[in-house]
Every structure is written in C-alpha cells, then in structure tokens.
Image (cartoon, rainbow, N blue to C red):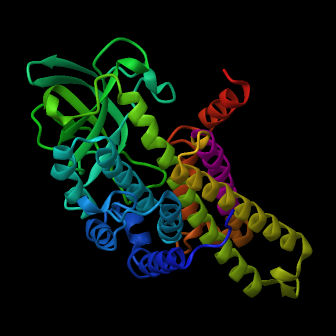
Amino acid sequence: MQFDPTDEQRAIQDAARDFAAGRFAPDAARWDDERIFPVEALRAAAALGFAGLYVRDDVGGSALGRLDAAIVFEELASACASTAAYLSIHNMVAWMIDRFGAPAQRTRWVPRLTSMELFGSYCLTEPGSGSDAASLRTRAVRDGDDYVLNGTKAFISGGGTSDVYIVMARTGGEGPKGISTLVVEKGTAGLSFGKNERKLGWNSQPTAMVIFEDARVPVANRLGAEGDGFKLAMSGLDGGRVNIAACSLGAARACLDAALDHVRQRRQFGKALAEFQALQFRLADMATELAAARLMVHRAAAGLDAGAGDATTLCAMAKRFATDVGFKVCNEALQLHGGYGYLKDYPIERHLRDVRVHQILEGTNEIMRVIIARQLLGV
C-alpha cells in the first residue's frame, strides 16, 4: 500500500501540470466562449504521450498504468476539464483497439490515434437507450464481407469531427450478448452527423448525433468476436470512469485553490474572509472530501492496473463519489466568491458547468449505485 507517488509519477505529474498551465489554461475560457475544438493543443498533448497513456509502446503508446493516467487527467483538468475529458475518451478509443484489436487493426489505427493524426469517438448511447445500454437498437446485418449498419448514436463527443468511431451495434438477438463492436471510419458512405449540440458545459469539444443509414462496414473492422461488444464496451468504461473522476478532481482542486486565494484577499466587516471560522470549516470540508475522493480514484486505478476482481466496483465507487464531490467543491467555491464567482471573468463558473455532466456520463451516478449494490448483494 503506497500512498506517495513514485519519482516517475512525480515527473509525469510535473510534465502534465506544466503543459496544462502553458497550453490549456491561457485559452480555456476562449475555447469555452467560442466553442473551439483545440486541435493543435490536443496534438501538442499527444506529442507528450497523453493520447495513448496506457496503450502499448509498439504502436506509439506511452505504456503507462491507469494510476499514471489518473494523475495526468487531474492535472490537465485543473486548466480545462472539457478538453481533458475529450482526451480521456480518445484514450479509451485507442486503448480498446490496442487491447482487443487484431494485429492488423492495431497497426492500422493506433499509431495515428496516439499521435492524434486521427481523433477518436466512443459510440454507445442512443436516443432511446442511455442507462439501459444493453437495449441499444443500432443494428449491423452481415452481408458478405461487410456489415450493413443502421441506427443513431446520441451525445457523441467528437461527433462529426473525429475520424474513428468505436460503435456498439446489435449483430444478434436481444440483450448484451447480441452486441458487437465495429470500427467505423469517417467518410464511410451512409455515415452522417447531427448538429453540434448546444450544451451547458464541455464547449471545447463538439457533441453530435452519429447516424448510420445503410453504412457498409467491413467485417475486418470488427473488434473481437461477434457478441463480445457489450463486454468490450464495459471494459472501456471502467477506465473511462476513473479518468472522468480524475477530471473532476482537477477542476475541483483548481476551484478550491481559487477559493483559498479569494478568502485571503477579500475583506468584509473589517477582516479577511479567511478569519471567519464558518468559512474556515467550509474550506476544511472541501479539502477533506477532495482528498478522500482522490484516494478512491487512485485505489480504483490501482485495481485496474492489478487486474483486481472487484475493479469494476471500485471504479463505480470512485466515479460516483469523486464526480459528486467535484461538483460540490466547485459549487462551494462559487458561493465563497459571491457575485464574482458567477462572472465569466473568473474560471469558477466554467469549471462548475464542465463538471456537472461528469455525474451523468460514463454511466450515471445512479447506475454506479446499481453496480455497487449488485456486487454487495450478489444479484
């Protein structure tokens, strides 16, 4: 049981923190205001190895662990949680092809994903199937050497901009065992996209429907065997939950730091806000809950690295707790700033808007409770 980062992890943390301060922080507010997808900044992150953190190094990955990745995502999100979260999804796509793809698939796509020559998206959610993901209706019908794909995916990060789409589609009967995973490339005939959604937060990444109308996808683009798709999708989400939890930590930490600076400088009733015991207690609770959340995230990441049998439950616990705490800390920091926290001149409101969705995506926090309860009760 090791609570302190190794020397290598400290170096990774320092590199990510310096990069976030130099490349994400100066432009994050503009990306949010103008809904800019920062391609060049993301490719600069890829040049440091951040686009394939736990991808094997023979295809351009950094070959790091999930704990290393959680450290990186916390640092990146302290500057821009929206952009860090897209990078988390991209990492999930690269890892799924690296982990489950055949040798030809790995060499075809992964090196260009880890360099971010190609951008990736993960396509599971549909207009009619969110939390009940196994009820998805997108269907892939075998026709010779191709699948003919029909259906619609919703709320897809990178939709319309990404080059590679990991798509879960029904190739068999009802339920999870009838689902397979296909890699669909941008430019495929029959692939189209909805409008870029207008969102509360996450404005530095496009979000759109991904639509398939008789899109022909080669059988050679299937990851794993027919019927393995739901299992592959859930494996990807275990890591995605840890990553998004780490992004919540980063945004919350930035808000806590800003609140500490503010209460030291702001004076009311003849003294600094920091001198009021009620506010001291509030700050103490924020710091304590954030530290507890970080421990849970790192424990879940270590469980994934170790292949622990309860890793899925640990990831669900960490995601539920850290994303709730992350939003709470950002909200408390806004309250401590008073009216200033509500202004876009300060980053607090942007962090608040960006982390709110973390309680919904990668499985809602209600679904996290379902996963935890099933493990507890053996049902």
Residue 198: x and y in percent read 39, 48
- Identify the image quadrant of residue 105: top left
> Which residue occupies 34% across, 46% down?
99
The reply, left or right, for residue 41 in relation to residue 243 is left
> Which residue occupies 44% across, 23% down?
134
Residue 167: x and y in percent read 29, 34
- Magenta-drawn stretch, dominant element (helix, strand or loop): helix
- Identify the image quadrant of residue 83: bottom left
* Quadrant in the picture for the N terminus: bottom right
> Which residue occupies 38% across, 34% down?
124
- State the residue in front, 188 or 109: 109
- State the residue in front, 291 or 329: 291
Q: Is residue 318 above or below residue 142?
A: below
Q: Is residue 121 above or below residue 328?
A: above
Q: Is residue 316 above or below residue 352?
A: above
Looking at the rendering, the stretch of residues picked out in magenta corresponds to 312-331
> Which residue occupies 16% across, 24% down?
147
The reply, left or right, for residue 360 in relation to residue 124 is right
The reply, left or right, for residue 42 in relation to residue 350 is left
Residue 33: x and y in percent read 40, 64
Residue 66: x and y in percent read 49, 57
